[in-house]
Image (cartoon, grey):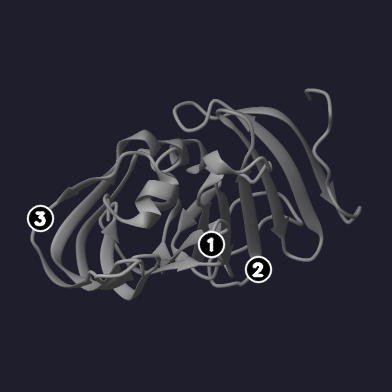
Amino acid sequence: FQNSPAARDLSEDLPSPHWAGTSSLDLELSIPLDPRPNQVRGRVRFLDNDLTLPAWNLALGRLRGEARFTESGLEAKDLRAALRGEPVRLDLNLAGREGRRELRTRLRGRLGMQTLLGGPAAALEPYLSGKSYWDILLTLPTGRRDRLDTAPVFALEMNSDLRGMAVRLPEPLGKPADATRPLKMTMQSREHNALELTLDYGAETQAALALSGWPDDPQLARGELRINAGAAIVPETPG
């Protein structure tokens, strides 16, 4: 992957991945004797691999499954892995037209806050407990160094019905573990080490937050919370 077109396009945004473990490779290479471009087609079988992204403090273990690639594309469906010890499933897809492709990674599993957030989850322990099913989509635009637009370095969307997770907050925010309440969180990178996060919790609660210091020491810079008061908007000034 590190030598693929996707990796070259993502080189400025995808933090240096570290791979370990055993895999197998099937490769077909076509080199025409005329001006036509070379063609590559292959597949990689992950037999029990580990993938670490040190800059994001993220590690996947026991990765198993198959990824297919060409000179311009990448796809993998239903990969099995462990995120901080919990089983998850992964899909990968390099989608879009040339110069505007996106690497989309979808992760699914029954997870708790410690698995989702790592160390920062400790601050939520008094308020959240248990595990619920999550559907998470990470989108990384490729080729940003060749474009003049302001596409985010990444976009992250997280969805859960929170069944199995207790929320120990005052009404109307609290709920028992056996109740469902839809939660949608979206996160987009902005300038260096800055993130914008929006949250929709049930039908009545919305929040919009700006964070600094990501990923090493996330801090709330400014934000707005609304309950039964319409859409939240990130304030222009701190607070």
* CA neighbours of label 1 inside 10 A, class few (<14), some (14 to 19), many (20+): few
Q: Which residue is mark 1?
A: 98
Q: Is residue 151 left or right of residue 78?
A: right
Which structural element holds mark 2? Answer: loop
Q: Which residue is mark 2?
A: 181
Label 1 – label 2 distance at C-alpha: 40 Å
In this rendering, which labeled residue sits more in front, label 3 or label 1? 1
- The single residue placed furthest to the top in the displayed view is 238
Is residue 133 visible to the viewer in this orientation of the structure? Answer: no
At x 52% / y 42%, what residue is drawn? 124
Q: Residue at x 54, y 30 (%)?
A: 218
Q: Check the picture and name the quadrant holding the N terminus.
A: bottom left
* Mark 3, secondary structure of its residue: loop
Tell me how far mark 3 sits from mark 1, CA to CA: 32 Å
Mark 3 — residue? 21
Q: Looking at the rendered structure, which numbered label has been put on residue 140? A: none
Crowd around label 2: few <14 · some 14–19 · many ≥20 (10 Å): some
- The residue closer to the viewer here, 236 or 69, is 69
Please name the amino acid that badge 1 sits on: Glu
Residue 186 is at least partly visible in this image: yes
x and y, in percent, of residue 37 in the image: 35, 66
- Taking the image as shown, residue 53 lies to the left or right of residue 186, namely left
Q: Quadrant of the C terminus?
A: top right
Q: Residue at x 47, y 54 (%)?
A: 129
Camera-nearest label, 1 or 2: 1
Residue 36's image quarter?
Answer: bottom left
Distance from the alpha carbon under mark 3 to that under mark 2: 40 Å
Instruction: Please name the amino acid that badge 3 sits on.
Output: Gly
Task: Give the image location of residue 214, x and y in percent.
Answer: 52, 31
Q: Earlier in the sequence, mark 3 or mark 1?
A: 3
The image position of residue 42, as x and y in percent, is 23, 73
